[in-house]
Image (tube, helix red, strand yellow):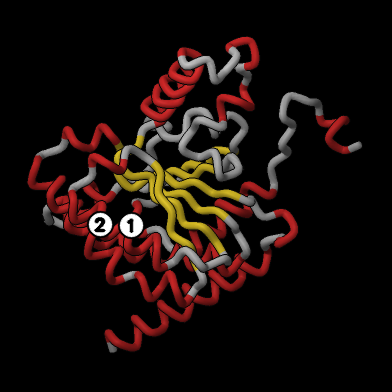
């Protein structure tokens, strides 16, 4: 009986996902989606487990979200995996996160290859644990030929760090007389950001019901549509991604203009 109920639940969930997916206008997809994956710790604690249990179960959410985005035709998906502030967490949790990252990069290579997804990363990668750094670069190299979608992991990343680092690089260029300070504008500045290869996110999703940006892509989300969901990250599934995209498609994006100008 329990097995029958589970099968029925899975069928209902699958049908709901298909219904939502069919409502999405593939001509109006966000080119780039960014996600703050929040709520792993609370998800685990509510089940009487250690926080790392939530991170482990969040891997399935990453798999489903990445494959769903690629299937739809989203070209860039950026996931906030580890911030510069996360080093402040208990060492046992940080070590577990690093080990989980290595294991996930290894185990999910087949998923990336099967879905033609290219892995990339942004952040201060040189300060990652050596095993993480090596496994990350190996997976990046192995998926370099994939073309369907780019999955970008933000690791040891923060928006303020990135902006400060870009300013530092610009200052060096000015000091070495390679850059004319009078020529520095927003476009030039963007060329010194970690994300210079990618378009700005059009949709930013945050899970777990928190309403803040948490130092993520501060420059790049200037005109992004923000979507907040109470769903904790380990419970986030394809259906939840579809809901966020449908919400995005019902918004009017004005970029400083008025509605009449947009309609024209």
Q: Residue at x 33, y 57 (%)?
A: 137
Residue 156 falls in which quadrant of the image?
Answer: top left
Provide residue 256's location: percent of width, then percent of height: 73, 24
Residue at position x 43%, y 54% from top?
A: 120
Q: Is residue 221 left or right of residue 9?
A: right
**Up-down relation of residue 66 to residue 154 (above or below):** below
Q: Quadrant of the C terminus?
A: top right
Secondary structure at numbered mark 1: helix
Q: Quadrant of residue 9?
A: bottom left
> What's the mark number on residue 221?
none
- C-alpha separation, residue under disc 2 versus residue under disc 1: 5 Å
Front one among 263 and 97? 97
**Residue at the extreme top of the image, as rendered:** 182
- In the drawing, does residue 58 fall left or right of residue 24? left
Mark 2 and mark 1 residues within 8 Å of each other at the beta carbon:
yes
For the N terminus, which image quadrant? bottom left
Circle 2 crowding by C-alpha within 10 Å: few under 14, some 14–19, many from 20: few
Q: Dot 1, crowdedness within 10 Å: few (<14), some or many (≥20)?
A: some
Q: Position of residue 87 (x, y in %)?
A: 19, 36
Residue 172 placement (x, y as % from top left)? 43, 19
**Residue corresponding to mark 1:** 137
Q: Residue tagged by mark 2?
A: 134
Out of 256 and 148, give the one closest to the viewer: 148
Q: Position of residue 110 (x, y in %)?
A: 38, 76
As helix, strand or loop, the secondary structure at mark 2 comes to: helix
Q: Is residue 195 above or below residue 148?
A: above
Depth order, front residue of 210/99:
99
The quadrant in which residue 164 appears is top left
Q: Is residue 208 left or right of residue 147?
A: left
Q: Name the residue: 75% across, 59% down.
A: 27
Query: Residue at image x 38%, y 37%?
Result: 210
């Amino acid at each position: 009986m329990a097995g029958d109920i589970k099968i029925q639940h899975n069928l209902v969930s699958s049908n709901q996902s298909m219904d939502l997916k069919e409502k999405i206008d593939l001509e109006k997809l966000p080119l780039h989606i960014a996600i703050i994956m929040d709520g792993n710790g609370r998800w685990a604690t509510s089940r009487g487990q250690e926080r790392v249990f939530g991170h482990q179960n969040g891997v399935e959410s990453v798999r489903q979200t990445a494959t769903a985005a690629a299937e739809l035709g989203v070209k860039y998906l950026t996931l906030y995996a580890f911030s510069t502030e996360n080093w402040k967490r208990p060492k046992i949790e940080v070590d577990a996160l690093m080990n989980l990252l290595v294991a996930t990069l290894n185990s999910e290579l087949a998923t990336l290859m099967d879905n033609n997804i290219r892995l990339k990363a942004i952040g201060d990668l040189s300060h990652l644990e050596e095993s993480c750094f090596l496994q990350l670069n190996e997976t990046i190299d192995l998926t370099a030929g994939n073309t369907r979608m780019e999955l970008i992991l933000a690791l040891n990343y923060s928006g303020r760090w990135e902006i400060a680092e870009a300013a530092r690089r610009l200052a060096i260029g000015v000091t070495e007389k390679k850059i004319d300070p009078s020529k520095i504008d927003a476009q030039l500045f963007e060329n010194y950001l970690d994300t210079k290869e990618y378009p700005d996110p059009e949709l930013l999703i945050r899970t777990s019901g928190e309403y803040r940006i948490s130092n993520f892509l501060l420059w790049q989300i200037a005109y992004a549509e923000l979507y907040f969901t109470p769903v904790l990250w380990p419970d986030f599934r394809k259906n939840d991604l579809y809901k966020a995209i449908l919400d995005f498609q019902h918004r009017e994006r004005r970029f400083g203009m008025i509605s009449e100008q947009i309609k024209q």
